[in-house]
Amino acid sequence: MATKKGTEIKLHPDDFELECTTVWAFPRRGNWATHTSDWRGNWSPEVARNLILRYSKEGDILLDSMIGGGTTAIEAKILNRNIVYSDVNQQALDRTKKCLDFKVENKSWQRGFKWDSRNLEKIKDNTVDFVLTHPPYVDIIKYSEGKLVDDLSNIHDIEAFCDEMEKVAKEFFRVLKPSKFCSILMGDTRRNKMYQPLAYKVMDRFLKAGFLLKEDIIKRQFNCKATGFWVDKSKAANFLLIMHEHLFVFQKLNDL
């Protein structure tokens, strides 16, 4: 248990087991610490916890440069990992800072910055132990409604989005220590009734940046908004609903 303003809070999920296959499914959202599900598109705490436990150790420095609802930072603090987190959206940074307002019995630190993931120049080369983040999927969810020109979620064109994600990949490769890991969660979409493999397009840009692909994990989606409406549309227009995402784990084994 930990405390938040004098109130005890649970720090760990019930019956947690480390995932050991390439298919992950978490039908319930995390109900421990300060996790909530009201930030649209945030990834499950179980995803962050599994990644942190598998690909880092206590005392490591983690990076999530698209912190969103703060999930990664919460888990890093609980699991005694240090984290540098950032976002272009001040609302995300304010929310994350608020979510980190609880005490734990370790000496981990958390540092937040308003940075663009395509420009992490204030982080030195080869200094991060593990990168993990959940980027937007083009403009499926717009986090700033077009108000921020540096917000990746305002890019509609898929190839233009991938061009920008390649810049992100190069920065991740640069700051990551040799032999360490980088993980991103990415989904697909449809355009003009045709399936668009956005995840694999982004994956290809990370490979182009110098990473090697260690794992391609299929994550099942749950509780998608408007599912009932889209079930009827699926039957009427004869298309399948996309209910999975790709969780890629990359490794940096060679410098560019």
Image: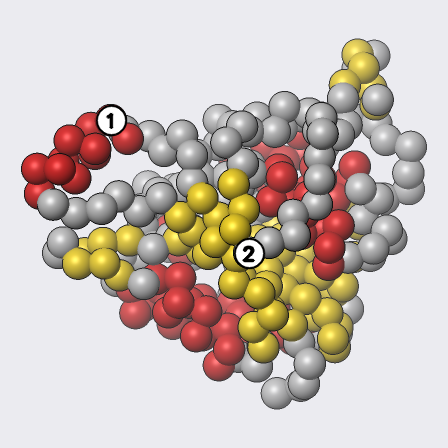
- Counting every numbered tag in the picture gives 2
Q: Is residue 111 visible?
A: no
Pick whichever, 75 or 21, lies toward us.
Answer: 21
- In the image, residue 226 above or below residue 172: above
**Mark 2, secondary structure of its residue:** loop
- In the image, residue 103 above or below residue 164: above
**Image quadrant for the C terminus?**
bottom right
Q: Amino acid at mark 2?
A: Thr
Label located before the other in sequence (2 or 1): 2
Pick whichever, 162 or 28, lies toward us.
Answer: 28
**Mark 1, secondary structure of its residue:** helix
The x and y percentages for residue 239 are: 16, 47
Indicate left or right for 255 with 237 as reference. Answer: right
Q: Is residue 163 visible?
A: yes
Pointer 1 residue: 228
- In the image, residue 147 above or below residue 214: above
Q: Amino acid at mark 1?
A: Gly
Image quadrant assignment for residue 190: bottom left
Q: In percent of the image, x 48 and y 54: which residue is there?
A: 218
The x and y percentages for residue 101 are: 74, 27
Q: Nearer the viewer, mark 2 or mark 1?
A: 2
Mark 2: give few (<14), some (14-19) or many (20+) Cα within 10 Å. few
- In the image, residue 174 above or below residue 5: below
As drawn, the label of residue 22 is 2
The x and y percentages for residue 83 are: 74, 50
Q: CA distance from mark 2 to mark 1?
A: 28 Å
Indicate left or right for 238 with 208 as reference. Answer: left
Residue projecting furthest to the top: 7
Q: In percent of the image, x 67 and y 86: which residue is there?
A: 255
